[in-house]
Every structure is written in structure tokens, then in C-alpha cells.
Image (tube, rainbow, N blue to C red):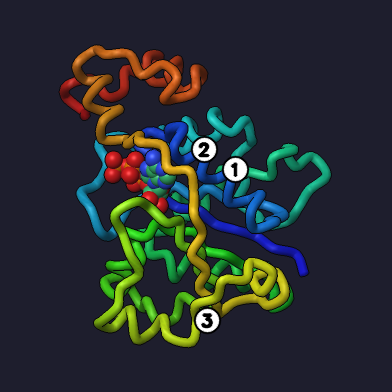
Amino acid sequence: MKAVGIFGGTFDPVHIGHLRTAVELREHLGLDELHLIPSARPPHREQPGVSAEHRLAMLSLAIGSETHGDSVVSADLPADGLFADDRELRREGLSYTVETLAQLRAELGANVALCLCIGMDSLVNLHSWQRWQELSDYAHIVVAARPGWHLPETGPVAEWLAGRCTNDPQLLSNTPSGCVLVEAMTLLPVSATQIREDLATGNSVRYLVPDAVIQYIHQHGLYKQENS
Ligand code: ATP
């Protein structure tokens, strides 16, 4: 079965923590393609100071792919299978993940494994997401384990996890949706918050952010004191 992953975030800006995670997820899960999807209007946090168009452009530069809204594996797929996917910029309103999954599932049909990749911090708060119990109807959920976070043991998410958790990555490519897998990841101690602060104070972010993205940030005057 073909397997497609999605990895969302504000990417404000994209950094090596995101990129390394994306590469490892694709390899560990054997995904044919992994879509990195900037959240145009994130529902759960302050709206980013930098536009979704700029954040998408930086992401595309970072992974060296053209923006790609369709879920078709094409002949010119970059070797590492990563895509910047602009679908949440093309929708109105807040960027709810459940709507993104429903849209992708409708495009892919029933016989493709779809994996939603999230951090453990997101899993713990999953019950605050729009229509969260429907997420596993459309996709598997792959949780990147971060130090200091554990699977919830009580509460609505813990109840929901019972019977869905698996240790077998193979199961994810044999079925289209419905499982939760916790995956140990290399978690580089990098955050976009720190990068925005460094840029605002004029410190270098070299080697934390790809050079092409640094160039874009300077060209467009992003993350200066007033919009950081
Ligand atoms: P901010 O500091 O603005 O909150 P962030 O660096 O956490 O941003 P996001 O765009 O919010 O980045 O994160 C997108 C996804 O990437 C989330 O699932 C998040 O858990 C994950 N992520 C963020 N930083 C890292 C990192 N250093 N290593 C691995 N995954 C990361």
C-alpha cells in the first residue's frame, strides 16, 4: 500500500529540527512522500507575525521543492520525498487538521496509508483539537517522542488511545488509518522561538536554518524587532 505522511507546523521559520525530523519520519515509516504543511491560521496559538506566504516560501527553499498541493507521486519527486504543501493557505478560516486530513483522504481514496505526524506535546493536548476523535478515521497518528513527555495515562486522550496504540511500524503501511505509533526521534534542541529572538537581536542563525532561508529572511526584512 502506498503511504503518505503529513507534518504540520507554523514553520516560523523552518529550522533544522523540523527538517531532520521530516527526513527521519519518512525513512523510519517508509513513506512514499511526506507533506510539510504550514498552518495558515493556527487555531491554538497566537497568529504568526510573518505571513503564511513567506513561511511557505521559506519551507520550499529549505527542502528544495516546488510548492505542491496535490497528493500524487510524480516522476520529478525530489529524492528525499519531502513536499511543501500549500493546501492550508488555499482554505478560508482557521487551519484545522481534521479538515486537511479529510481533504487528503478524499484525494487519495481509501487504499493509501495516511500518517499524521505530531509531537508528544501535541498528543497530550489532542482533546483540544477540532473534532479530534475523527482524526484516526482518516489517518494513523505517529507521535514523535520528545524528552520529558509521556503518553497520557488518564483522561479522554488516554481512553481514546486504548486499543489504538501499536509498536509495529509495518501495521501503518498495511492499513489506511486508525493506529497510533510512538516513534523515538533525534530531537535537536532548536526552536523557532529562539531563532526569531536571535534574528530580532541580530545574532547569527547560521547552521540552525538553511542558508537559502537566511538569505530570504534578509531579502524580505523578516523577523526584525517590529515583526518578531
Ligand atoms: P515555536 O518555537 O514558534 O513554537 P517550533 O520550533 O516548535 O515553533 P512549529 O512550527 O510550531 O516549530 O513545529 C512544527 C512541528 O515540529 C511540531 O510538531 C513540533 O513538535 C515539531 N518540532 C519543533 N521543533 C522541533 C525540533 N527541534 N525537533 C523535532 N521536532 C520539532
Look at the picture and state if 154 lies above or below 15: below
Residue 75 in picture, x, y percent from top left = 83, 44
Picture coordinates of residue 48, whole percent (x, y): 27, 41
Kindly state the secondary structure of the residue where label 3 is placed: helix
Label pair 3/2, CB-CB below 8 angstroms:
no
* Camera-nearest residue between 136 and 108: 136
Query: Any mark on residue 19, and which?
Result: 2
**Disc assigned to residue 9:** none
| Point 49% across, 17% down: residue | 211
Question: Are dots 2 and 1 in contact, CB under 8 Å?
Answer: yes
Q: How far apart are the alpha carbons under marks 1 and 3?
A: 25 Å
Give the amino acid at mark 1: Val
Which of label 3 and label 2 is nearer to you? 2
| Left/right of residue 59 with respect to residue 52 in the rendered view | right
Query: Where does label 3 land, which residue?
Result: 137
Disc 2 residue crowd, few under 14, some 14–19, many 20+, Cα 10 Å: some
Question: Mark 1 against mark 3, which lies toward the viewer?
Answer: 1
Give the mark, 3 or 2, whose residue is nearer the N terminus.
Answer: 2
Badge 1 density bin: few <14, some 14–19, many ≥20, Cα 10 Å: some
**16 lies left or right of 111:** left
- Residue at which label 1 appears: 23
For mark 3, does the 10 Å Cα neighbourhood hold few (<14), some (14 to 19), or many (20 or more) residues?
some
From this view, report whether residue 110 is shown above or below residue 39: below
Left/right of residue 96 with respect to residue 25 in the rendered view: left
The image quarter in which residue 214 lies: top left
**Quadrant location of the N terminus in the rendered image:** bottom right
Residue 148: name its quadrant.
Answer: bottom left
